[in-house]
Image: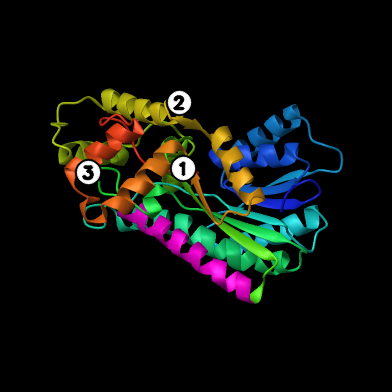
Amino acid sequence: MKEFAGKLAVVTGGGTGMGRELARQLIAEGCSVAMCDVSDKNMAQTIALAEADGVPQGCKITAHVADVSDEAALVRFRDEMAKAHDADHLHLLFNNAGIGGGGSIVADDRAEWERTFNVCWGGVYFGVRTFLPMLLAASEAHIVNTSSINGFWASLGPHVSHTAYAAAKFAVKGFTEALVTDLRLNAPHVKCSVVMPGHIGTSIAANSRKVIRGTEEDALTADELARARLRMTRAGIDAAAVPDAAIQAMVAEQARRFLEDAPMTAAEAATVILDGVKAERWRILVGEDAKIIDRMVREAPDQAYELDFFQKIAAAAGWQLNGIVGNRQE
């Protein structure tokens, strides 16, 4: 698919981050977009930005509230977008929505673990299942599934549990790689790509807890403060005497740094992704850190989860050891 003008795309997680920037850039190229998100407010901001950029004549951007981990919600989204765009086919499917959380299968809440896994993996699986008939009905189509560097390196460092997100992103990677052959055999006009971003500047660090807790509030609850203290204790920090306000400030600063101090912006990442789709690359690495880590893990897989290996990766990728590393995008 060498150009997007006149095409129709679905973007999940279109309210913020890479999803928002994919929607904006697709619209700018003359592609109509139907996006979903759990936040109507965030999607309204995406539409406002797209309209400020300028929506080409004949293009349309629509917003639909849907939780991608709920198959029935995705089916409802599909039916709504088909009616809104008067379409019986679909050219582009960006399964982009994702959240972080549920790091430890031993020490963390099971509901949070499964919520993270179900959004990051279930959203991709249900997305493909739900929109496949419309993709098959198009003359050409492309499925774009967002994994992560955590889809080939299941770590945020040796002192941080990261099982739910990493397991989901490994599943997305394997599923998409298997789709390459499946589609060639059974639907050769449909292509697919797996996206593997490094640290991209998005609001996932702030948004994930809101999705998991079902809130729009920035202030941490008493339960979240207790969890934050527990994580600090696991990391060897005496958190008992740390005031609630200080913990709130630390969490806010961590989210700010993830968004603002990233080596690549969400807009830059979206451009790399769309260029990869046009080039029909089935594997799209996003960011120099993703390329560096991919190479290092391949060269020394047996050492990938040792402390000195993480220190080498952090140095090579330009990460600060006391910052948030890896990508928990979308």
Q: Which residues are magenta?
A: 163-185
Residue under the point 40% across and 38% down: 289
Asked which quadrant contains residue 109, the reply is bottom left
| 146 relative to 43, above or below | below
* Residue 298 seen in this snapshot: yes
Sort mark 1 into few (<14), some (14-19) or many (20+) by Cα contacts within 10 Å: many
Residue under the point 60% across and 47% down: 276
Q: Which residue is mark 2?
A: 260
* Residue 15 seen in this snapshot: no
Question: Residue 71 at x, y = what percent?
Answer: 56, 64
Asked which quadrant contains residue 251, the reply is top left
Asked which quadrant contains residue 313, the reply is top left
Q: Residue furthest front?
A: 299
Q: Which residue is mark 1?
A: 329
What secondary structure is found at the residue carrying circle 3? helix
Measured Cα–Cα span from mark 1 to mark 2: 13 Å
> Magenta stretch: residue 174 in it?
yes
- Magenta: predominant secondary structure element? helix
What secondary structure is found at the residue carrying circle 1? loop
What secondary structure is found at the residue carrying circle 2? helix
In the foreground, 277 or 77: 277
Numbered disc in front, either 2 or 3? 3
**Earlier sequence position, callout 3 versus callout 1:** 3
Sort mark 3 into few (<14), some (14-19) or many (20+) by Cα contacts within 10 Å: some
